Image (tube, grey):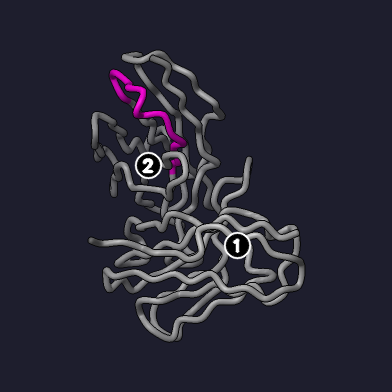
Amino acid sequence: GNSVTQMEGPVTLSEEAFLTINCTYTATGYPSLFWYVQYPGEGLQLLLKATKADDKGSNKGFEATYRKETTSFHLEKGSVQVSDSAVYFCARTPYGGSQGNLIFGKGTKLSVKP
Amino acid sequence: EAQVTQNPRYLITVTGKKLTVTCSQNMNHEYMSWYRQDPGLGLRQIYYSMNVEVTDKGDVPEGYKVSRKEKRNFPLILESPSPNQTSLYFCASSRGGLEAQHFGDGTRLSIL
């Protein structure tokens, strides 16, 4: 079926630390993959996306590579800032079934301390 | 500015009192969706719409209704709200069914 699994949080890092948030998806179809970020009190914002295998999405220093062989789309950033504190959601388009739907992971809360 | 606007942002009400959460987008998007966000469960789709007068159920449609009479608006209706519908609700729109979605800022509903 369709699912996305993210590492559970919360994740607490010091400023300038390296960040990895793991995300894996079920190997059904050829999904597009997304990372969304939700800052406190706000809606979700698209952070980056990748539409096919080996694509790398990048934005604001964050990167994620679409790995078909490992069905993964891990989010990375080399040096986090306090302003990166937010909840991060991995998502995929569904295989078959309903259109206009994204399948979301449960979210990973990141806290960055100065 | 491209945006998805939800109203109200916050609402506290009582069981059984009908309520409507409005959603409007100014990007001429075909697809619109409603999600609810609950701790430990992430986001789950309630209903979606592929175009005017075309709607379909998502993963958790029970207790909700929607309509799409105009392209820009997609209201969420709770005919008889119950406490288990207390949640944070998001409206989203996209150009296509497999495109990235644009989200509103959310509506926090508390049903007492």
Picture layout, residue B108 above or below residue B13 = above
Q: In the displayed structure, does residue B86 sit left or right of residue B23?
A: right
Q: Which residues are magenta?
A: A77-90
Q: In the displayed structure, does residue A41 sit left or right of residue B83?
A: left
Where does residue B46 sit, x and y in percent of width and height?
Answer: 57, 65
Query: Which residue occupies 31% across, 42% down?
Result: A47
Callout 2 crowding tier (Cα within 10 Å): few <14, some 14–19, many ≥20: many
Query: Which residue occupies 69% across, 64% down?
Result: B13
Q: Nearer the viewer, residue B75 or A93?
A: B75
Whether the magenta-drawn stretch holds residue A45 is answered as no
Amino acid residing under circle 2: Trp
The mark found on residue B68 in the picture is none
SS type, badge 1 = loop
Amino acid residing under circle 1: Asp
Query: Which residue occupies 45% across, 29% down?
Result: A22
Where does residue A69 sit, x and y in percent of width and height?
Answer: 38, 34
Q: In the displayed structure, does residue B3 sit left or right of residue B38?
A: left
Contact between labelled residues 2 and 1, with CB atoms less than 8 Å apart: no
SS type, badge 2 = strand
Picture layout, residue B75 above or below residue A62 = below
Examine the image and state in which quarter residue B86 appears: bottom right
Where does residue B104 sit, x and y in percent of width and height?
Answer: 41, 58
The residue pinned by badge 1 equals B59
Picture layout, residue B13 above or below residue A29 = below
Where does residue A33 sit, x and y in percent of width and height?
Answer: 36, 46
Q: Nearer the viewer, residue A4 or A109?
A: A109
Q: Nearer the viewer, residue B104 or B40?
A: B104
Query: Which residue occupies 65% across, 60% down?
Result: B12
Q: Nearer the viewer, residue A64 or B78?
A: B78
Q: CA distance from mark 1 to mark 2?
A: 21 Å
**Chain under numbered label 1:** B
The mark found on residue A35 in the picture is 2
